[in-house]
Image (cartoon, grey):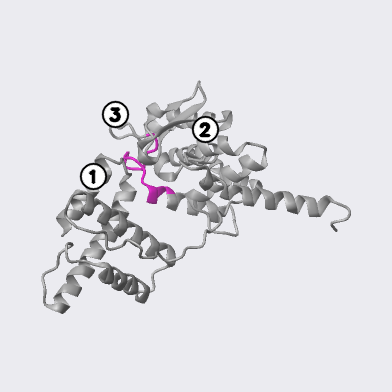
Amino acid sequence: MKEDINSFLTYLTVEKGFSENTIFAYRNDLYQLASFVEEEAAKRGSAASWASFNRQDMLSYLLNLKERNYAATTAARKVAAARSFFNFMVAEGNMKDNPSHNVGSPKVGRSLPKPISFSQVRRLLEQPTKLSTPEAKRDRAMLELLYASGMRVSELVSLNVSDIDIEGGYVRCFGKGHKERLIPIHERAASAVEEYVKEFRPRLTRNDTERALFLNRRGERLTRQGLWQILKGYAKSAELDKEVTPHTLRHSFATHMLSGGADLRSVQELLGHANISTTQVYTHLTTEHIRRAYEKSHPRAK
């Protein structure tokens, strides 16, 4: 059964250009589904197969997810993965019908992004400047670049040295589906990256053929997990009163851009959102900001 899943994952990688992280999530979800099918078949004393998996089995799988107390967002993702996989199986002629057709997915409330204020961002970005080690200079360049561009953390750690154009003032990154976009970066961020690349990255390099922009102490490409740990340390030293993740800087970038007057379409392009509806979630935050300013300033609102 896993052979069919692996064929589907290959299709997503080659034909659809899905990212490594998305493929990893699909693999985990579908392998779990395969285990469920095998366990149910064993209970009935029959052979497990996708062809015999029907709508009632799909409903049983949903109940199983509920009994295991998965969050609604996680359960919805697993159902979506199953639905996509069964569509593929039907298209390939390996199944007659999609057993997830007309099976409802767990309702998921849309959670609002949680940005931090500009003053909190400033405190966070000041933390690496207190040290002069190669790692601190790298960290300053990373955090400045994250907040200047709104990139996803996976996009940031995937950058190569050749993706930065200091003189032109932009960074080239590849988002979901390997879609390329050019993002302008302000002078302060460009300066931090230039200082790191020219003076401090060579001190972290162990292999002259390494192309990665941001390196760890072993001279290898920094991982998402490594960046997360670095950020947690700086957030703690900045005494921020909320959890800060790499995505927090992306949310803050979008919110602060819109609050500063940027139009929604421009922010959509900078973030690499395929649909503007994804970007529109930030307008709620900016209108709340306007309402607070109104209530604070208007003489009749007090």
170 sits left or right of 105 in the view: right
Residue 45 point in image, percent of width and height: 11, 77
Of badges 1 and 2, the one in the foreground is 1
| Quadrant of the rendered image containing residue 172 | top left
Residue drawn where x is 16% and y is 73% of the image? 41
Q: Please, what is the three-letter code of the amino acid marked with disc 3?
A: Asp
Instruction: Evaluate whether residue 34 shows in this view.
Output: yes
Q: Which residues are magenta?
A: 213-227
Q: Earlier in the sequence, mark 3 or mark 2?
A: 2
Residue 281 point in image, percent of width and height: 57, 50
| Quadrant of the rendered image containing residue 130 | top right
Between 53 and 81, the residue placed more toward the observer is: 53
Residue drawn where x is 25% and y is 70% of the image? 57
Write down the residue under mark 2: 192
Of badges 1 and 3, the one in the foreground is 1
Query: Marks 1/3: CA distance?
Result: 35 Å
Q: Please, what is the three-letter code of the amino acid marked with disc 2?
A: Ala
Q: Residue furthest top?
A: 167
Residue 116 point in image, percent of width and height: 60, 51
Badge number at residue 11: 1
43 sits left or right of 142 in the view: left
Q: Is residue 199 above or below residue 238?
A: above
Query: Marks 3/2: CA distance?
Result: 22 Å
Residue 294 point in image, percent of width and height: 79, 51
Badge number at residue 208: 3
Residue drawn where x is 14% and y is 68% of the image? 48
Helix, strand or loop at label 3? It is loop
Q: Please, what is the three-letter code of the amino acid marked with disc 1?
A: Tyr
157 sits left or right of 151 in the view: left
Helix, strand or loop at label 1? It is helix
Q: Is residue 37 above or below residue 280?
A: below
Q: Earlier in the sequence, mark 1 or mark 2?
A: 1
